[in-house]
Image (cartoon, rainbow, N blue to C red):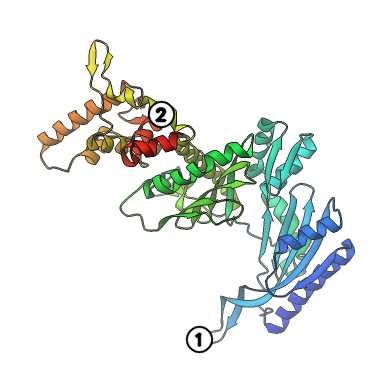
């Protein structure tokens, strides 16, 4: 086999790609720009769109010097070998208005292996679909500020991950990489993977005043009350002592136009921020899919069976990215729901102090000022219990010290069972059918969170938050 990627041939292929990009730009009557230094490419494209209205096709081509991975031929005492290394090379950026995808850009590396990155914005794709369906909307930047039919728009959005992405991406690759039509690459295709997949859930408020009043309390609650275990739970993970990685919360108030909070688990993120003071956005960003699981057919010991396996970057698992991120956003919003109007929950605190009578049996009340009762409330609200619920033993271990005495454990379990029953008769806990597990009801989430805040912040703080 000839080593065609030697320096001279590599330069030749690179020049061929650049000349093809210039020809595409000239044929479409758009600009080809060579950029030096740092530039905001999106702003340049916005300016071009304002100067000349495009309805479809190529908008411009930008060429930049960047550092990217390439394959080098290394010589040594042994046989020559190929290895990946970074090198300075030209990168081509093609900006299109695509009939199916809306505004997209494609980045092409001009040295072997000629990697391609395709950036697709789901909001732009959805706008194209709604235009075809005749559905009205207002799109500002990358957010919808108004929708004629939100339910239909959501059903369309849910179809995004189920498109024939392999066919679509191969079509785009052939447009920008003419080398795929040459004899030595005929029959070869790119292997497509997902990189930094973002999934957002937007809540549109009726007025900026409504969000402005609530948003600071949401930020404070997320920054102060969400612990590492809670963040793991939002992202569909359980806390374990063997967990190896950082879990951080970053709270920024100097960001324009508003503050935001960002939780990071290793290289995956969960963010909350506002758009234009009108939209509350919860966003899950997946950079490392191996932290999540997907059901896949695997061969084990010669037998095929369905098993939970690490999620991959391949587009085959695209649907699972949506499932994981949507569940993460929903858990986060559910945990924030207690902030919406805490006043009502504070007024209900008195209910906990009163005995409850059910079936001619009286169940004692709780003391919101007792550290023992607060530990109970914190135990049942623990983030680890949100996904699959909890057993008596989980709460027993959180309330009592471990002991080797079987008799002592039985007494502790009985005492814990009575506490859980007292919460159950007040509709704060719900029994999971056909199991020995419990989970906290929506009423319990709001009321117990309010009691914990009242205990830690005191009555002045509670009144301030309820005002």
Label 2 crowd (10 A; few <14 / some 14-19 / many >=20): many
Say which residue appears at 46% left-offset and 34% top-offset.
467
Residue 441 in view (yes/no) = no
> Residue farthest to the top?
360
Pointer 2 residue? 345
Residue 440 higher or lower than 36, as above or below: above
Which of disc 2 and disc 1 is earlier in sequence? Answer: 1
> Residue farthest to the front?
460
Residue 326: quadrant of the picture: top right
Picture coordinates of residue 35, whole percent (x, y): 74, 72
User: Observer-nearest residue: 114 or 224?
Assistant: 224
State how far apart marks 1 and 2 are (Cα): 74 Å
User: Observer-nearest residue: 458 or 228?
Assistant: 458
What element does badge 1 sit on?
loop
Count of labels in the image: 2
Is 348 displayed left or right of 195 in the figure? left
Say which residue appears at 38% left-offset and 34% top-offset.
450
Pointer 1 residue? 78
User: Observer-nearest residue: 172 or 336?
Assistant: 336
Residue 251 higher or lower than 333, as above or below: below
User: Observer-nearest residue: 307 or 57?
Assistant: 57
Label 1 crowd (10 A; few <14 / some 14-19 / many >=20): few
Residue 346 higher or lower than 245, as above or below: above
Say which residue appears at 79% left-offset and 39% top-offset.
131
Picture coordinates of residue 218, whole percent (x, y): 49, 42
Is 152 displayed left or right of 402 in the figure? right
Residue 357 higher or lower than 339, as above or below: above
What element does badge 2 sit on?
helix
**Mark in front: 1 vs 2:** 2
Residue 92: quadrant of the picture: bottom right
Query: Is the Cβ of the residue at disc 1 closer than 8 Å to that at disc 2?
Result: no
């Amino acid at each position: 086999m000839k080593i065609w990627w030697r320096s001279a041939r590599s330069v030749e292929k690179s020049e061929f790609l650049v000349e093809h990009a210039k020809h595409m730009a000239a044929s479409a009557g758009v600009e080809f720009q060579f950029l030096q230094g740092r530039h905001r490419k999106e702003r340049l494209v916005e300016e071009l769109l304002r100067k000349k209205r495009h309805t479809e096709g190529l908008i411009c081509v930008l060429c930049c010097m960047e550092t990217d991975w390439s394959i080098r031929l290394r010589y040594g005492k042994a046989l020559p070998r190929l290895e990946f290394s970074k090198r300075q090379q030209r990168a081509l950026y093609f900006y299109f208005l695509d009939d199916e995808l809306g505004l997209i850009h494609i980045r092409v590396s001009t040295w072997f292996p000629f990697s391609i990155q395709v950036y697709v914005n789901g909001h732009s794709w959805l706008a194209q679909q709604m235009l075809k369906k005749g559905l009205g909307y207002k799109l500002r930047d990358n957010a919808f500020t108004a929708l004629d039919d939100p339910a239909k728009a959501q059903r369309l959005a849910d179809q995004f991950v189920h498109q024939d992405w392999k066919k679509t991406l191969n079509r785009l690759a052939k447009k920008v990489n003419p080398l795929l039509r040459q004899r030595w690459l005929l029959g070869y295709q790119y292997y497509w993977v997902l990189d930094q997949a973002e999934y957002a859930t937007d809540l549109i408020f009726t007025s900026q005043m409504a969000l402005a009043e609530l948003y600071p309390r949401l930020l404070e609650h997320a920054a102060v009350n969400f612990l590492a275990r809670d963040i793991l739970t939002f992202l569909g993970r359980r806390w374990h002592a063997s967990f190896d990685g950082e879990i951080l919360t970053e709270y920024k108030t100097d960001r324009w136009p508003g503050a935001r909070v960002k939780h990071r688990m290793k290289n995956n993120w969960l963010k909350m921020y506002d758009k234009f003071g009108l939209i509350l956005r919860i966003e899950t960003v997946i950079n490392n899919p191996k932290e999540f699981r997907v059901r896949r057919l695997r061969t084990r010991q010669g037998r095929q069976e369905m098993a939970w396996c690490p999620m991959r970057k391949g587009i085959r698992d695209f649907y699972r990215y949506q499932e994981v991120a949507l569940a993460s956003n929903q858990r986060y919003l559910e945990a924030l729901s207690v902030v919406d109007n805490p006043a009502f929950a504070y007024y209900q605190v008195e209910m906990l102090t009163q005995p409850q009578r059910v079936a001619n049996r009286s169940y004692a009340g709780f003391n919101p000022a007792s550290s023992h009762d607060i530990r109970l409330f914190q135990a049942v609200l623990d983030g680890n219990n949100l996904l699959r619920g909890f057993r008596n033993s989980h709460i027993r271990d959180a309330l009592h010290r471990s002991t080797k005495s079987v008799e002592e454990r039985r007494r502790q379990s009985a005492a814990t069972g009575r506490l859980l029953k007292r919460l159950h008769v007040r509709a704060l806990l719900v029994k999971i059918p056909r199991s020995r597990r419990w989970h906290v009801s929506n009423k319990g989430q709001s009321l117990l969170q309010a009691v914990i805040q009242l205990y830690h912040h005191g009555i002045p703080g509670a009144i301030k938050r309820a005002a």
